[in-house]
Image (cartoon, helix red, strand yellow):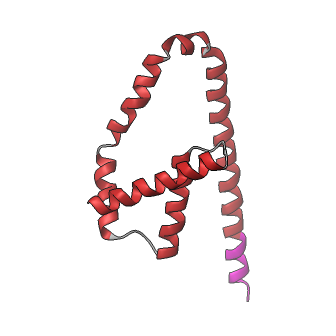
Amino acid sequence: MLTPITLLLLFQLAGEAISMFFALPVPGPVIGMALLFAALAWRGGPSTELRETAQKLLQHLSLLFVPAGVGIMLHWQRLSDEWQPLLVALVASTFITIAITALVLHALTHRKAASATREQRP
């Protein structure tokens, strides 16, 4: 279990280093996760040990939200001062995400139906 956790932390460290070195607006863990995904796709998937470790981490996922909750409590005054723009941003981003997801799903189902129709033609 130590090797997979070390692997996950190394990819997070690599993402943090890339994010800081190039001054990217993307968080380091996101870059590290993309690098991990690319490495796993190149290798053909995760090892059994990595898969089991990931399952164990997912079982305790709620503990990972504690720092976010502490941050909300720590900055409660700022949140209460700026709740309107935050609410607008949350609602707008939710609707934009739903709309883009619907458009992508529509395009993909249309493409699949069109390819199925072409395959049926003699």
In which image quadrant can residue 107 be found?
A: bottom right
Camera-side residue of 97 and 20: 20
Outermost residue toward the left in this view = 1
Camera-side residue of 93 and 20: 20
Q: Is 9 rendered above or below residue 110?
A: above
Q: In this view, does 68 lie to the left or right of 102?
A: left
Res. 56 in view: yes
Outermost residue toward the bottom in this view = 122
Q: State the image coordinates of residue 58 (x, y, percent, origin top left).
A: 34, 49
Q: Is residue 76 magenta?
A: no
Identity of the residue drawn at 36% across and 30% down:
66
Identity of the residue drawn at 73% across and 71% down:
114
Figure quadrant of the N terminus = bottom left
In which image quadrant can residue 82 be found?
A: top right
Q: Give the range drawn in magenta.
A: 114-122
Identity of the residue drawn at 60% across and 48% down:
19
Q: Does the magenta stretch include residue 118?
A: yes
Q: State the image coordinates of residue 119 (x, y, percent, origin top left).
A: 69, 82
Q: How many numbered marks have been drawn onto this rendered protein structure?
A: 0
Q: Is 15 rendered above or below residue 65?
A: below
Figure quadrant of the C terminus = bottom right
Camera-side residue of 81 and 100: 81
Q: State the image coordinates of residue 25 (x, y, percent, origin top left).
A: 66, 42
* Dominant SS type (magenta): helix
Identity of the residue drawn at 50% across and 17% down:
75
Res. 52 in view: no
Q: In this view, does 16 lie to the left or right of 21?
A: left
In which image quadrant can residue 118 be found?
A: bottom right
Q: State the image coordinates of residue 44 (x, y, percent, origin top left).
A: 46, 75
Q: Is residue 81 left or right of residue 5?
A: right
